[in-house]
Amino acid sequence: MKQKFENDLETLYDYIGEQKTNINKLYEYLENNEISKLDIIDQFASQLNIKNITNDIRLALITRLVSLRDDSLVQVLKKLEKSEDEIISLQEIAYQFVKNYWHNIHKNTIDYIKQNNLLTPFYQEVFAGVYNVGIAMSSWQTSWTKFIINGVNKQLLQMHNNDEKKVFEFLEKNSLYDLGHNREIADRCYSVLIQKDGKFESQAYIKAFKKEVTAVVDALENFADNLIELDDEVYNQKWEYILYIQSLVKAFSNDKPNTLVQSWADVDEAWMSITTPIQIGHPLEYYEDHFRKAVALEWDIRLTSPKAVKSNTRATKLENMFENIYSKLEQKKSYKDIVIFSKKSLTKVQLYLGRPALFFGAELNGLFSAQVVPNDEVVSKKYGKKIFAFSDEILQAQRAKPFLKLSREILGQEFLTQERNFLFKQTQKWHQVYDITTIGHEYGHILWCDDITESAMNSTGNFKNIEEFKATTGGLVSFYINNDTDESNLWQDVLRDTIKRAVGLIGWMEVDEVQPYYCEGLIHLSGLFDSKVLIWKDNKLHIDMSQDTYNNLKQWYITTYTSLAQHYLDKKDATIWLNQFAIKDDKYFMPVDKTIHEFVLHYFQRYKTIGQELDTVDKKSNYI
């Protein structure tokens, strides 16, 4: 039975891959100027009341629909001279269009499983149950965004003359954060702020969004009831799933703000005991809400690849690097517990390599390339974490994306030719680099932290804005100081990936929910310019990937990461460290270094001007 189940998993995994290939063809039709095959994009434009559809508009709409990112769409709407309020309204119309499109695709997946009698009745019901809950989660997403992101958060900024520091002080002074474990201020919230009689108070999701959350709870209760009638004959985890779903019902139904973190810790604990290849994802992350870190409405199924070979090699390399860096620091007694905490967390990681199969709610505004969760470090201390990595999905997406004029103008054809030969012709090496940079990033999150690090370092709201750099650089430094020959031949590929990432992240300057990644990019740029890998001269970017500049860069990363580790061990405010590299200039962070500042402004201006224009010089046929 288990063998049949694994065969069915492979069939389903391949089906989802083929489904994505067909969806990605929208990019291909645009590249080949087969506009008649882009009916869905014409419908999308019509919904947004966009009349004269140019190719840059088509690309932005395809990117929103296929890649689920709306930064390109926002730039296009700005070029069409839409006001901020109009853009917010059009983003919501776009969300509804994307939601209906993907819900239909997910319904086809459910039908495919049923019609081909894949998996077992129990797991067929898991898929159906997640889908039904997902419909409710996606409906709620609209109210959540309107109320928190475009409502109370903008109100708080207006009240404090756009001074974020004053917003954080106001929230703390008025006890407007949820309390977590041991009645301390939590690093996240499962509530919203409601204004009553001129004063703010916290309200749990169930009170603030009664209709929407009740629909989610009803769907979850039906889900649990349906599973009770069935048995998990393959993995014997029936009751793990049911107890998990029941804990979700309890958490969503809890109306007392200062007990919410504990309710959701119970969810995470129940979830950690589910170890099958079919993993449900629930509200876990909190990037969108900059002020109170209200947890986003994630809901999905992640399907593990039956062919994936699990290995703890990356964890071992991260641990070796961690010990190496720590040995160079002062050995204070107060650091010891953090070091033990980090190392224990590394050893407890469950690694899942696969694809998102169904996704709803906040994930219709962007999927992750990988994820390490839960964020609740009290839970992780006992139960560890799960790392999800979607390398097949990411490789497929990168190969599908069209070549852009901006990339050639900034990075140059020589760099892009090397990168594209690698992307299209070196599949195995590509997966190795993904392991170093992306899976290494997820393991990198675990290091130098204990259960109070985030709340201690986030008093001015910038913890996430250094944490993403810490994560990526953990993976990179483990590669740089590793003497094994098994990866040493990848140094140019890893360096190109770092350059491409650092430069590309500039495009996210104005997208608030991904500000941590934008800030990460600015810090990477500091290293790339400091080591002379990148030189900005006469309005042109020069790239030097020689052994000398690479060695300079390696040393810069090791020194910078060591200083960051020290900062984490001392639990100092994140803004202090970030401000060495970037300082908030009005609304957005900008580099401290004058030359990098000039380059970032140049790149972003060109991104706004030609960021959606296709490159007609180079073709995929040169590589495939």
Image: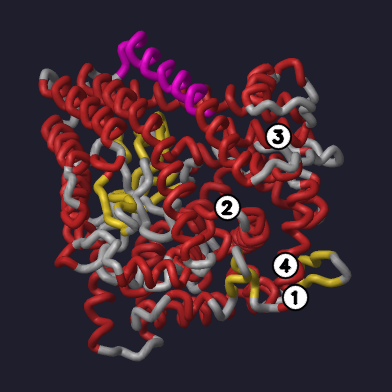
Marks 3,1: beta carbons within 8 A = no
Q: Nearer the viewer, residue 97 or 19?
A: 97
Q: Nearer the viewer, mark 3 or mark 4?
A: 3
> Which mark, residue 595?
1
**Residue 433 location in percent, x, y?**
54, 54
Neighbor class of circle 2 (other Cα within 10 Å; few <14, some 14-19, many 20+) is: some
Q: Nearer the viewer, residue 572 or 356?
A: 572
**Left or right position of 313 against 62:** left
Q: Nearer the viewer, mark 4 or mark 1?
A: 1
**Left or right position of 617 against 611:** right
Marks 1,2: beta carbons within 8 A = no
- Determine the main secondary structure of the stretch shown in magenta: helix
> Mark 1 belongs to which amino acid?
Thr
Residue range corresponding to the magenta coloring: 98-118
> Mark 3 belongs to which amino acid?
Leu
Question: According to the image, label 2 marks what residue?
Answer: 511
Q: Give whichever of discs 4 and 1 has the lower sequence position.
A: 4
Q: Give whichever of discs 3 and 1 has the lower sequence position.
A: 3
Quadrant of the drawing holding the N terminus: top left
Magenta includes 115?
yes
Q: How far apart in space, not on screen, are marks 3 and 1 (Cα)?
A: 31 Å
Question: According to the image, label 4 marks what residue?
Answer: 545
Q: How far apart in space, not on screen, are marks 3 and 2 (Cα)?
A: 18 Å
Neighbor class of circle 4 (other Cα within 10 Å; few <14, some 14-19, many 20+) is: some
Neighbor class of circle 1 (other Cα within 10 Å; few <14, some 14-19, many 20+) is: some
Q: Give whichever of discs 3 and 4 has the lower sequence position.
A: 3
